[in-house]
Image (cartoon, grey):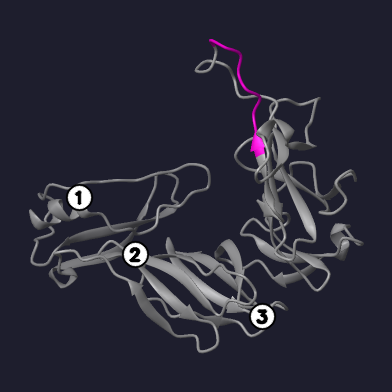
């Protein structure tokens, strides 16, 4: 995390000679490194001497007013602490603790942290938290939880951009910092999109879009007009009009409806006798959404 003329970073102790490839990564610490100085002179920012297995990370708010400390026991729930960046000897103040939720700070604006969290909202919500009123009862909902999963929220151009997962595909919405003036962003199609992050004074933001039949492309988004233009499109010898992609729903053994995408060449008889590549993934709350693959196109071309 860059700050002033240096950056904060996480670091494991250098393993003893002869154990470089076998020693466990324990006792992670956070340091600050000033550019142009030896790493040996880096300032220790945080360590937990009582729990050597914690994962630690640092971030700095865009206005450089606060240093954020992220603490994790594993790959899911984590805690967040903060302190003023200029108070290098001050204690970290808990923003959310107890490893009871998955949370992250999106931005700091109007004297409040904008925090994405699944605490009390399995599908996630965005709340505003004042550093002076940290009790959960004082949180103010900016983007409430909905029936669709809120994957993340980015900020840029003085707007918030919320990515939702709807039937395993992306929907992006633009909000004011108050959570008002919700506007859906028109994407090139039904697929997977990511991006829209930037500084508050940047009115040109960028996002990627892809689907099973749409090569991964980059678009430039004008915050004022809401218009998107192609910034980069890969040159691939492939005609998506020769193929079909559709989404079906199947029931698993316990009755849960599972979305399945079927992609094939036009004219293919769906008689259950075609060679088929089936791919799925599950883990870490990661959903597999549409994406383009040149190696998969070779199979599609051959029926």
Q: Which residue is drawn at 29% across and 69% down?
A: 233
* Label 2: few (<14), some (14–19) or many (≥20) C-alpha neighbours in 10 Å: many
The picture places residue 279, in percent across and down from the top left corner, at: 30, 46
Q: Residue 176, which numbered label?
A: 3
Per the image, is 225 magenta? Answer: no
> On the picture, is 289 further left or further right than 8?
left
What is the span of residues highlighted in magenta in the rendered image? 10-18
Q: Residue at x 40, y 52 (%)?
A: 288
Q: What element carries label 3?
A: loop
Per the image, is 14 magenta? Answer: yes
Q: In this view, does 94 lie above or below 121?
A: above
Q: Residue at x 45, y 45 (%)?
A: 254
Q: Is residue 42 above or below residue 250?
A: above
The picture places residue 242, in percent across and down from the top left corner, at: 12, 69
* Label 3: few (<14), some (14–19) or many (≥20) C-alpha neighbours in 10 Å: some
Q: Earlier in the sequence, mark 2 or mark 3?
A: 3
Quickly name the residue at label 1.
295
Q: In this view, does 61 lie above or below 156?
A: above
The image quadrant that residue 114 belongs to is bottom right
| Contact between labelled residues 3 and 2, with CB atoms less than 8 Å apart | no
């Amino acid at each position: 995390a860059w700050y002033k003329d240096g950056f904060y970073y996480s670091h494991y102790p250098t393993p003893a000679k002869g154990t470089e490839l076998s020693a466990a990564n324990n006792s992670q610490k956070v340091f600050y490194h000033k550019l142009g100085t030896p790493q040996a002179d880096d300032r220790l920012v945080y360590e937990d001497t009582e729990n050597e297995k914690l994962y630690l990370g640092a971030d700095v708010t865009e206005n450089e007013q606060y240093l954020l400390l992220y603490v994790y026991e594993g790959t899911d729930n984590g805690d967040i602490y903060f302190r003023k960046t200029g108070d290098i000897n001050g204690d970290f103040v808990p923003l959310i603790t107890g490893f009871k939720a998955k949370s992250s700070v999106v931005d700091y604006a109007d004297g409040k942290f904008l925090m994405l969290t699944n605490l009390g909202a399995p599908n996630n919500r965005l709340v505003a938290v004042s550093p002076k009123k940290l009790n959960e009862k004082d949180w103010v909902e900016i983007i409430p939880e909905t029936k669709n999963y809120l994957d993340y929220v980015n900020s840029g151009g003085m707007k918030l951009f919320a990515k939702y997962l709807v039937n395993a595909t992306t929907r992006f919405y633009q909000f004011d910092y108050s959570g008002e003036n919700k506007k859906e962003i028109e994407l090139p199609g039904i697929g997977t999109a990511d991006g829209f992050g930037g500084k508050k004074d940047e009115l040109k933001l960028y996002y990627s879009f892809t689907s099973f039949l749409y090569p991964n492309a980059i678009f430039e988004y004008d915050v004022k007009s809401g218009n998107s233009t192609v910034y980069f499109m890969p040159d691939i010898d492939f005609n998506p009009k020769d193929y079909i992609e559709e989404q079906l729903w199947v029931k698993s053994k316990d009755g849960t409806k599972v979305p399945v995408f079927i992609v094939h060449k036009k004219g293919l008889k769906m008689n259950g006798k075609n060679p088929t590549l089936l791919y799925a993934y599950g883990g870490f709350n990661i959903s597999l959404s549409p994406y383009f693959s040149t190696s998969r196109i070779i199979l599609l071309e051959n029926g």
